Image (spheres, helix red, strand yellow):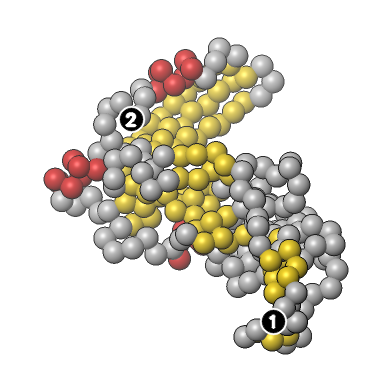
Amino acid sequence: MTDPAWVLSLRPLLPVLLAVVLAAPASALAPAPARAAAAGADGVETARTSRQIAPGIRLESYDRLEADRWLRIDELLVDLGGGGVRAEYLGGRGPATVAESAARHAPGPGRRVVAAVNGDFFDIRGTGAPLGPGLGGGRLLHSAGPGPGAAPAVGFGADGTGRVLRIGLAGSVTLPGGALLPLTGYNAARPAAGGLSAYTADWAGTRLPALGGAVAVRDGRVAA
């Protein structure tokens, strides 16, 4: 299974002054009791641990007894507005697990990877590729499946503000004779039936979807 994920990175914490600058303000991460109360009164919290893993990043782990089940919950609380922590998308380098993607990710000079989390649902019984859209480094890596029922995506602006988005695809393919055909999928795990989909080196699946015929294009020419 491939695991495109969001990775959190920040600058090294050795200089004391730098650590102070990167630390989240007290209001950025609400106290644990306040969040527990806000979660509702339909269950009982039986245990909780809290660990500051980096300035602006805290891991909360707790157990809850609900009416019909036990829950083990891990929450990663992140302040993306402090200037030191940023979220990046790990997809776009072929099939990989979250751990593999995080290990090979290059966060940039003076930065290190702190945490990575699963960020999508997958075509588990088919290609293993993510079902939703993915963008990284300012470019499209894969589009979502067709139709209005496609799940929304989560994105982060340059200022660290999070947004819930619905990302569509608008594109075309130019044939040798100059004719344009609409592009209905781009590295999509479940492309539209009867449509035209493109697959590149960013494809995150273990195999291509079993829909219709396929041709390989290299340097602008059909190779197979």
Badge 1 element: strand
**Image quarter hosting the C terminus:** bottom right
Badge 2 element: loop
**Position of residue 116 measured from the top left corner of the image (x, y, whole percent):** 47, 50
Q: Residue at x 64, y 51 (%)?
A: 168
**Image quarter hosting the N terminus:** bottom right
Picture disc at residue 179: none
Give the camera-side residue of 194 and 173.
173
**Position of residue 124 measured from the top left corner of the image (x, y, whole percent):** 73, 54
Picture disc at residue 28: 2
Q: Residue at x 44, y 21 (%)?
A: 35
From the image, tell me which residue sits under label 1.
Answer: 217
Q: Amino acid at mark 1?
A: Val
Give the camera-side residue of 185 and 17.
185
Q: Residue at x 41, y 18 (%)?
A: 34
Does residue 173 appear left or right of residue 103 in this picture?
right
In the rendered image, the residue lying farthest to the top is 41
Between circles 1 and 2, the one closer to the viewer is 1
The image shows residue 145, relative to residue 148, as above or below, that is: below
Q: Amino acid at mark 2?
A: Ala
* Residue 200 visible from this viewpoint: yes
| Residue neighbourhood size for the residue with mark 2, other residues' Cα within 10 Å, grouped as few (<14), some (14–19), many (≥20) | some
Does residue 188 appear left or right of residue 117 in this picture?
right
In the rendered image, the residue lying farthest to the front is 178
Distance Cα–Cα, label 1 vs label 2: 50 Å
